[in-house]
Image (tube, rainbow, N blue to C red):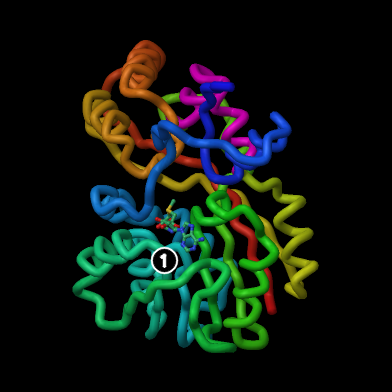
Amino acid sequence: MFIRATVWNDNAIIELLVTLQLESCYIIGVICLGIDFHDEKNKYSYTTRKASDSWVIAVKTLIEVPEVKRAVDIGTGGGIYAKELADLGIPKVTGVDFSESMLDGAKINCKMYNEIEFSVGTAYDTLLPNQYAELMLGRALIHHLDDLAPFFQEAHRILTPGGSLLIQDRTPEDCFLKGDSQHIRGFIFSLFPHLRKIEQKRRYSSTLVKQELEKTGFHSLKEIKIWEEREIYTNKEDLFEDIKARTGRSILHELSDEEILSLVNDIDHSIPDGRITEQDRWTIWKASK
Ligand SMILES: C[S@@+](CC[C@H](N)C(=O)[O-])C[C@H]1O[C@@H](n2cnc3c(N)ncnc32)[C@H](O)[C@@H]1O
């Protein structure tokens, strides 16, 4: 029997086998639609931005920064937020990522920062010692994880008693806010409703995040919402170039080049020309050990 199927990751292949009641399959052709963090050509995907003021204000509101001697940025990507943590005055920052390619980009991005070091490790096994840091940040990471519990257990292990975990990600509600000249992401889901299903599947609800944090032993949970400036474009053309390059928006890797062009066309008709300040809505959860 031959079946043509589009799957998004290994789990989706297993789900497909279960649904079709097959024990195994031969995969005769694979087109990878998601971003491959390990691919050398993506190493600068998460190096080109700077955190916005709203992010800095949120972190200062949630954390007693002067009490943090060491911070870990897990899923550091290009090290943008490792740099921000160092700029806040934290004397030692360790950026961890499972992708050596990402870390290659991060090392170049942070080469002026002696207080930052990088190491290879996964969210489930950072390879860092017990009670290593007072603060752990996981930004834009959890939607890439199949299971929150082992990640939160690892965070709990490497935090000092009283240490803080900051998780930042988008919930389905954050993602599906309507598109406008600031919230560009909203256009993606109105034009390609099938992507909602993928997004819904990989984004954790706030209820689940909080439940899992509490189950792991974290307490004093706080949740805030922020709009984070993502990029400023001088005009629509600059924005469209960025969309075509799929920079830092992993969901765009689910679209073909042709679909990307119709997205650009749709946005072109929906927003006025001129300077565009793109913003994304995020949820930040703070939990104490
Ligand atoms: C969307 S990027 C975010 C990068 C950075 N935190 C930021 O906000 O700019 C996600 C990062 O998490 C890393 N990552 C994904 N799954 C991981 C895992 N299981 N363990 C460690 N890192 C992971 C990827 O390699 C990538 O660098």
* Magenta stretch holds residue 137: no
Is label 1 within 8 A of ligand 1 (CB to nearest ligand atom)?
yes
Residue 135, image x and y in percent?
54, 77
* Magenta stretch holds residue 193: yes
| Picture layout, residue 101 above or below residue 226 | below
Q: How many numbered circles are shown? A: 1
The kind of secondary structure element at disc 1 is strand
- Residue 95, can we see it? yes
Between 37 and 233, the residue placed more toward the observer is: 37
| Picture layout, residue 49 above or below residue 197 | below
| Picture layout, residue 91 above or below residue 214 | below
Residue at point 72% right, 65% down? Answer: 213
Residue segment shown in magenta? 184-202
Q: Left or right: where does residue 130 sit relative to residue 268? A: right
Main SS type for the magenta part? helix
Residue 245, image x and y in percent?
27, 34
Residue at point 46% right, 87% down? Answer: 69
The amino acid at mark 1 is Asp
Q: Residue 30 falls in which quadrant of the image? A: top left
- Residue on which disc 1 sits: 97
Using a 10 Å C-alpha cutoff, classify the residue at mark 1 as few (fewer than 14 neighbours), some (14 to 19) or many (20 or more). many
